[in-house]
Image (cartoon, rainbow, N blue to C red):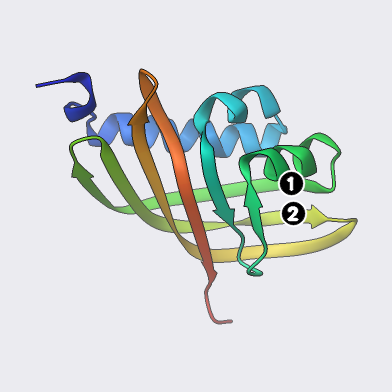
């Protein structure tokens, strides 16, 4: 069994916690480590970012996460791939406009380059 086959649910939670904490902290360095070079980040408003554009809007503070809370509802593990389904809530400022987040999300983590990296993220707003 390779290292890619051994990710536990606890390790998945640690990756998700680390990612969300970095988002709130605006820690582009940590997010750069966590995101795959091929990452696609789809926001709840249907805007799509690449890794470079996502890190760019965080770096220039066009997107500022004020607070985030998340819960993991389901983890699907396959060799080299983990899909996480959960809920996320919080508040952000996007281009100076305050928004409230309340959504379900899917995050796809892949084993590549000796570690686990977020390859795809999709957020869907929950009805009011």
**Contact (Cβ within 8 Å) of mark 1 with mark 2:** yes
Q: Secondary structure at mark 2?
A: strand
Residue under label 2:
92
Residue marked by disc 1: 66
Depth check: give the residue in front, 76 or 40.
40
Q: Which mark is residue 77?
A: none
Tag 1's secondary structure?
Answer: strand
In percent of width and height, residue 56 lies at 77, 39
Q: Which residue is at 72% across, 46% downward? A: 65
- Would you say 78 lies left or right of 109 here? left
Q: Of the two numbered discs 1 and 2 on the same chain, state the one appearing first in sequence.
A: 1
Quadrant of image for the N terminus: top left
Mark 1–mark 2 distance (CA, rounded to whole Å)? 5 Å
Q: Residue furthest right?
A: 96
Residue 20 position (above or below residue 86)? above
Numbered disc total: 2
Viewer-nearest residue: 76 or 92: 76
Which quarter of the picture shows residue 82? top left
For this view, does 45 lie left or right of residue 106? right
- Residue that protrudes farthest toward the left in the picture: 1
Find residue 86 and report its horizontal and vertical position in percent. 40, 56
Disc 2 residue crowd, few under 14, some 14–19, many 20+, Cα 10 Å = some
Q: Position of residue 72 (x, y in %)?
A: 36, 50
- Identity of the residue drawn at 60% across and 24% down: 30
Task: Report x, y in % for residue 92.
Answer: 74, 54
Q: Residue at position x 59%, y 81% from top?
A: 128
> Which residue occupies 39% across, 21% down?
113
| Looking at the image, residue 31 lies above or below residue 101 | above
Q: Nearer the viewer, residue 34 or 90?
A: 34
Farthest front residue in view: 38
Could you classify mark 1 by the number of other residues whose Cα lies within 10 Å: few (under 14), some (14-19), or many (20 or more)? some
Q: Give the farthest residue toward the bottom.
A: 128
């Amino acid at each position: 069994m390779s290292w890619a086959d051994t990710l536990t649910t606890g390790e998945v939670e640690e990756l998700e916690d680390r990612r969300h904490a970095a988002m709130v902290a605006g820690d582009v360095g940590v997010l750069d480590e966590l995101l795959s070079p091929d990452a696609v980040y789809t926001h709840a408003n249907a805007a799509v970012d690449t890794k470079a554009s996502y890190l760019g809007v965080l770096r220039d503070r066009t997107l500022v996460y004020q607070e985030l809370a998340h819960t993991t509802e389901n983890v699907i593990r396959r060799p080299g791939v983990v899909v996480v389904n959960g809920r996320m809530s919080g508040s952000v400022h996007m281009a100076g406009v305050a928004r409230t987040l309340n959504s379900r999300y899917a995050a796809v983590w892949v084993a590549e380059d000796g570690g686990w990296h977020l390859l795809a993220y999709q957020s869907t707003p929950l009805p009011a």
